[in-house]
Amino acid sequence: MKQPTRTINRLHFSDLDPLRFEDLCLNIVSRTDTFKEINHFGRKGADLGVDIFAIQNLEGKEKIWFIQCKRFIRIGKADITDIVDKVAMNVALPDKLLVIVACDVSRNLHQYLKDYSNEKGISEVEIWTASVLEAKLYKDYKDLLFVYFGVRVEKKTQDNATRIKYSLRMKKRVEKELIDHEYLKKNRTPDLLLFKPYAKFITHKVYIRSVDDTSYPDSDETPDGKISPWFRTFFYDTYHNGIEFWLNVAMSTPIIMDEHGFWEPLDHFDKRRNSPKYKTFYAIKVGRIPYHNIVEILREGDEYFSEPHLFCKFDIQEMPYEEIYYKTEGDTERKIPDWDLDKTLRTEFPGE
């Protein structure tokens, strides 16, 4: 089983084993309300959409809760439909359905859950997303943070102070060593950085190297599902917490989008690119490396590659990035900037 990541960023609920995630949900639910009875069926299988069954006593009246726990990395409309349909197969429906997921959920999807549940006869519905779970853990259940993620809040506060001081120092180094101030002085066109944010850097190319790598400059075969411990990429922009990198300069990522604005990035061999059900376009893939993950800067490169080298910690799911997101490709001539795709509408459509 993959070990939950100890992190100063968002909690990685997806690192938990599915049954362990259910246990976490059970722990939180049992402390949230005063229940007369709680049963955990999820571990036994064939639960008909009821991982946790609970009876709440409200002023002498019993309220039945069905609770479904899903350790999804992302969730789509089809998943919501499946969850509700399984619950609706029960002879007696609950007074309340609580869905707990390990990812974030868009507003449209949240509304669909409520509407579809109402259609199936379930009048009260609530959903706890990754953000809600994290807020509950940090606010009320700090002991569970340590039990499930090894996070001690007191130590985390000290670590955060150290991290912030380090990040501010590294930000100053980046601004001094990697930003081309002379170029910016000579080219003070208002739209320059809006349409070409990467123009601020001293070069476009940059090499990212893991502080734990011993293979450089050789290119060892990288195991499936992992990124190389050193690689070339391209500067894109800076942001409040670090540097952004353009990860797919050579070949933009195809995106399919449905009529409701939900979208999915594809590989170039996916046949769904040609489906009439979707609008297809291309996007820029951007990776964000926070300042606190940059250990050292080699501005002039070395005898192998003369572009800047950034030595980074690959400690966020074995990558240096705290986030990877997508932007539509703009058009400089037509004064159209790159535009962020709505992260809350990212989904996975059915295969063909």
Image (cartoon, rainbow, N blue to C red):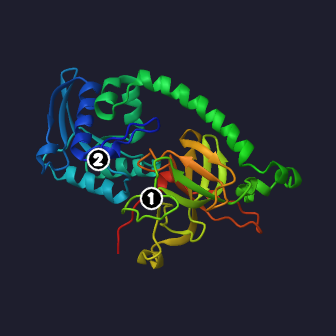
**Farthest-out residue, front:** 303
Give amino acid for label 2.
Lys
Instruction: Judge by depth and name the residue closer to the eye, 288 or 274.
Output: 288
Using a 10 Å C-alpha cutoff, classify the residue at mark 2 as few (fewer than 14 neighbours), some (14 to 19) or many (20 or more): few
Give amino acid for label 1.
Ile
The label on residue 260 is none
Q: Mark 2 points at which residue?
A: 2
Name above or below for residue 317 compared with residue 349. above
Q: Mark 1 points at which residue?
A: 227
Apparent side of residue 320 relative to residue 32 in the rendered image (left or right): right
Using a 10 Å C-alpha cutoff, classify the residue at mark 1 as few (fewer than 14 neighbours), some (14 to 19) or many (20 or more): few
The quadrant holding residue 78 is bottom left
Secondary element at tag 2: loop
The image position of residue 343, as x and y in percent, is: 51, 52
Residues under numbered marks 2 and 1 in contact, where contact means CB atoms less than 8 Å apart: no
Which of the marked residues, 2 or 1, is nearer the chain's N terminus? 2
> What quarter of the picture does the C terminus occupy?
bottom left
The image position of residue 267, as x and y in percent, is: 45, 70
The image position of residue 257, as x and y in percent, is: 49, 66
Instruction: Judge by depth and name the residue closer to the eye, 311 or 259.
Output: 311
**CA separation, marks 2 and 1?**
17 Å
